[in-house]
Image: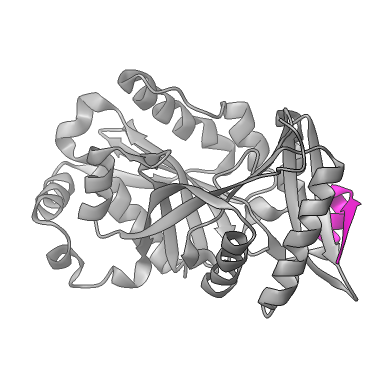
Amino acid sequence: MEVIEVESSYYDEAFANPYHIFNAGVFNSINSYKAEKVYYLLFKDSKIRMGIILGVRAGIAYSPFSAPFGGFQYLNSDIGIDQIDAGLKSLEEWSTSKLIREIKIVLPPLFYNRNFLVKLTNSLYRFGYTEINKDVNYQFLTDKLDEQYSSKIWYNARKNLKKSNNSNLEFRKLESSEGQIAYDIIAQNRSSRGFPLRMTWEQVKETTSVIPADFFVVLKDDQIIASAIVFHVASKIVQVIYWGDLPQFSECKTMNFLSFQIFKYYKENNIEIIDIGPSTENSIPNYGLCEFKESIGCDLSLKSTYLKINHNVHH
């Protein structure tokens, strides 16, 4: 199987429907300044079988180099393990020719495409990729939102939701042009907790030029006290990129209200899964976040990072 380097636009023609948006050339090209070089690779025998986008920094190739996850993209979902194997073998030869010392790949959680990801994980394991991180990811399946929802969630979450519903809060979806209002609330939330925001508003705005996004706010007495930014990342799947509230209103249990309203909104709009992302960083859990997401009815899945050290290239 040969490896063909192409331009981002050609990559997107080859893979017109990536199974998640972070595997799209157009998304990676707006972030290309974050890597020394970005490669858009096609793996082809009699025809194109799969592809990967790699950003290289200091001799290490990353997929993704600026996203929650990346990994390989198939052309047809019935791709065989033998074809994945052939692709990994040719990637090894290609990376040696480019003097790439390491390849680091973060795969999406299994619910993005279970069958393909299981095949891929098996191939990575046999080709000497080591799992260096097991992050705990949380997702909410909207079919869990029914008449029984409040009796199924944790007692404290039920109590907090009830309290928030009695706190005179209002949920509103903003126009795209008002997105910065949502961002500013999240920025205030993060600075009050001493956490930096990884993306500036300009970067979020630029990303929304290639990824459909929704912006939500919670108001109390006409004052905005919480917000969320959500990206449409795959068919029937959205991902909460940021959400947060102003700490001085925490007694209103704003986050319980916001999460419930978001679940309701997407259920009504035929979204099946809301990916709320990991509550671990490099596998280390944030206990409070883990508990909150579980308490509101999220399911858990693993998000794995794989590393391959190329022994043919001297460190």
Quadrant of the snapshot with the N terminus: bottom right
Q: Quadrant of residue 203?
A: top right
Q: Is residue 11 magenta?
A: yes
Q: Is residue 255 magenta?
A: no
Q: Is residue 105 left or right of residue 154?
A: right
Which residue is found at the position 55% from the left and 29% from the top? 199
**Which percent across, then down, holds residue 98?**
85, 40
Q: Is residue 223 left or right of residue 13?
A: left
Which residue is found at the position 47% from the left and 66% from the top? 111
Chain part drawn in magenta: 1-13
**Which percent across, then down, holds residue 56?**
74, 36
Looking at the image, what colour scheme do you see? one colour
Q: Is residue 291 placed above or below 238 in the rendered structure?
A: above
Q: Nearer the viewer, residue 273 or 179?
A: 273
Which residue is found at the position 21% from the left and 24% from the top? 248
Quadrant of the snapshot with the C terminus: top right
Q: Is residue 70 placed above or below 98 in the rendered structure?
A: below
Task: Give the total number of marks visible in the rendering.
Answer: 0
Q: Nearer the viewer, residue 139 or 132?
A: 132
Q: Quadrant of residue 99?
A: top right
**Which percent across, then down, holds residue 41?**
82, 53
Q: Nearer the viewer, residue 253 or 7?
A: 7
Q: Is residue 229 placed above or below 50 in the rendered structure?
A: above
Which residue is found at the position 71% from the left and 69% from the top? 84
Q: Quadrant of residue 297?
A: bottom left
Q: Nearer the viewer, residue 53 or 132?
A: 132
**Which percent across, then down, holds residue 269?**
46, 66
